[in-house]
Image: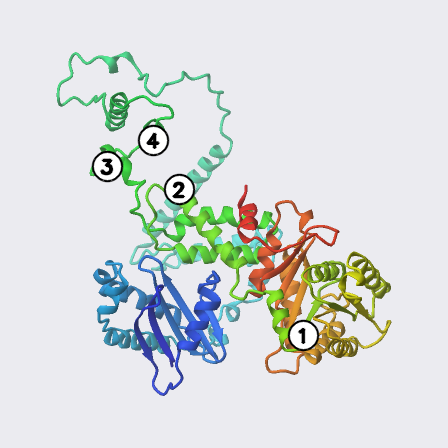
Amino acid sequence: MLDFFAIFSKGGIVLWCFQGVGVTESFTGPVNALIRSVILQERSGNNSYTHNALTLKYKLDNEFELVFVVGYQKILMLTYVDKFIDDIQLHFRDRYKNVLEQRGDLKLLLNNFDFKDDFTRLLHKAEESSKSRGPVSMKPFAESQKSQKTVKSMIETKGGDKGKEPSGKGKKGGKKEGELRVLTGALYTENGSQNLTQEEIVAMNREKFFGKKLRANKEKTSKSPKPQKPKGKQKRTWDNGGSSTKELDYSNSNGNSSHDASGPSEIRHIYAFMLLDSLPLQWPNPFFFFFFSLPPQSTKKGGIGGMFGMLKGLVGSKNLTRKDMEPVLEKMRDHLIAKNVAADIASQLCDSVAKKLEGKVMSTFTTVATTVKQALQDSLVQILQPKRRVDVLRDVLEARAQHRPFVITFCGVNGVGKSTNLAKISFWLIENGFTVLIAACDTFRAGAVEQLRTHQRRLNSLHPPDENSGRSMVQLYEKGYGKDAAGIAMEAIAYARNQGFDVVLVDTAGRMQDNAPLMTALAKLITVNLPDLVLFVGEALVGNEAVDQLVKFNQALADHSTSNKPHLIDGIVLTKFDTIDDKVGAAISMTYITGQPIVFVGTGQTYNDLRSLNAKAVVSTLMKA
């Protein structure tokens, strides 16, 4: 049923592996894809990953820096896999604990991990337990609670109780029935009494009746208690003042006296002051802050007292658990949402950090909050620096060497600033010595072509043809309104190839992610013209909407493409970044959901207001309180 199972260290050393019977394909490809796409990208919030026809489930052991991965066909519904991988982790840790604690890659390479018998036994046990449970069969109608309902149980009285007969005749009828039982000499009563005479049964029923009367009278009196007098002002009792002067009399005390004036807490404080007196007085003195920030120690017997008891909670001897991290993670989640990170993304980030830290030993003199915050900060930096780096200038030079233009297509929703940022990127490319052709493929919005023509005129005035051997550095290719955008883009690319332009920038119409006809037209434009780079232009102002936009744009490009490998979004242009102050969470949401980098950041309204993203600066701003 399982295709493979692998145990390897985070340093890349495979400790043990298993391959299923009849499986001929190597599992290195799926495992490497899992490492690149999930583990290295800090996306371990979900313990499942799909690669082609395989489903991979994994578990991180942060104490010994191990990764456990199991793979099986995704069409199979194996319910026992999660528990099975947990059992494998526990047994492997327990069996090779001494070897794993040595912490050396060479030691791991030299050791022989013979785990086949244990693995086979645990796998057989998991499969048998899954078969024994089996599907749950439905109860027949005769055994269900619904079949036992009667018309009487569905009648509602004025008091709101179902199935109870109204007071009066029903109660009298009940009394008569009870009297009838007694007079006929029934040997069984409601209280379970058997083999009694009629006189004993009557006496017992009388006692029960009078007992009920007495309890009812007590309940009535308890329902209306007398109003209590307000309490007067009580004398304050100080912690170290004692309750009376007798406690301060030690004339009759001996070694076995019950009054011990110097308990464990007093001894600890006196010892601290003795150490403070023996140390040189400097300000600020670290020992001063250290002793006065210690929490009170437990006075239970068997505890470690003195300095070692106080230092025990501060040194690195505690394994982090999910319960320890939960309060800190909850605060971090709320903080990220307040900084404009999408709610789902914030939860996944916190779950990923929890899995990354669970089981790790805390560093010396560090708190849980500090450890979690540092791990989250590292994860955010890693997310903003994804596996694929887009270097536009390098790619343009490679395309020029092949005697073809480099094509960039811009897409996004309405009003995010596609045309404006296209003009900024044109100015940046011209400044680096490249010629640009702008393809006006927004044939829907009124004024779109005129806006691009204005940008072309202004850019040529900043870089006049006289300074560039009589050639215009930027030109506009347009065919008016109401035409097919894919056809205009194809003609523009052919024109740029014939005229020797270095870059073609394709402007498209803004469209909402739910507009199926326009999304189909965008997918057609990209499929027909095969651009080198597809950039999604999004606002830094959005929160949860960023996730919805990117997911649906990518989904539409995949659904409406005729290719087996559809061209999806390659990068992001984040606009209006100067209007959000410290709420920079949209950058995290967009990068996390696509796995693609933020290529450019728009920071203003002039051509120079275009920047590359500084991941560490963004994370530092995001983590500020």
Sequence-wise, the earlier of marks 3 and 4 is: 4
Residue for point 49% across, 20% down: 230
Label 3 or label 4, whichever lies nearer to me, is 4
The colour scheme used here is rainbow
Q: Give SS at disc 3.
A: helix
Q: Which mark is residue 19?
A: none
Percent x, y for residue 547? 62, 61
Q: Give SS at disc 1.
A: loop
The amino acid at mark 1 is Pro
Spatial CA distance of label 2 from label 4 is: 66 Å
Sequence-wise, the earlier of marks 2 and 4 is: 2
Where, quadrant-wise, is the C terminus in this rendering? top right
Label 2 or label 3, whichever lies nearer to me, is 3
Sequence-wise, the earlier of marks 3 and 1 is: 3
Spatial CA distance of label 3 from label 1 is: 67 Å
Q: Which residue is mark 3?
A: 308
Label 2: few (<14), some (14–19) or many (≥20) C-alpha neighbours in 10 Å: few
Percent x, y for residue 290? 34, 31
Spatial CA distance of label 3 from label 4 is: 14 Å
Residue 168 seen by the camera: yes
Left or right, 77 with reference to 579: left
Where, quadrant-wise, is the N terminus in this rendering? bottom left
Label 1: few (<14), some (14–19) or many (≥20) C-alpha neighbours in 10 Å: many
Question: Toward which corner of the image does residue 570 lie, by quadrant?
Answer: bottom right
Label 3 or label 1, whichever lies nearer to me, is 1
Q: Which residue is mark 1?
A: 531
Sequence-wise, the earlier of marks 2 and 1 is: 2
Q: Which residue is mark 2?
A: 211
Q: Which residue is mark 4?
A: 290
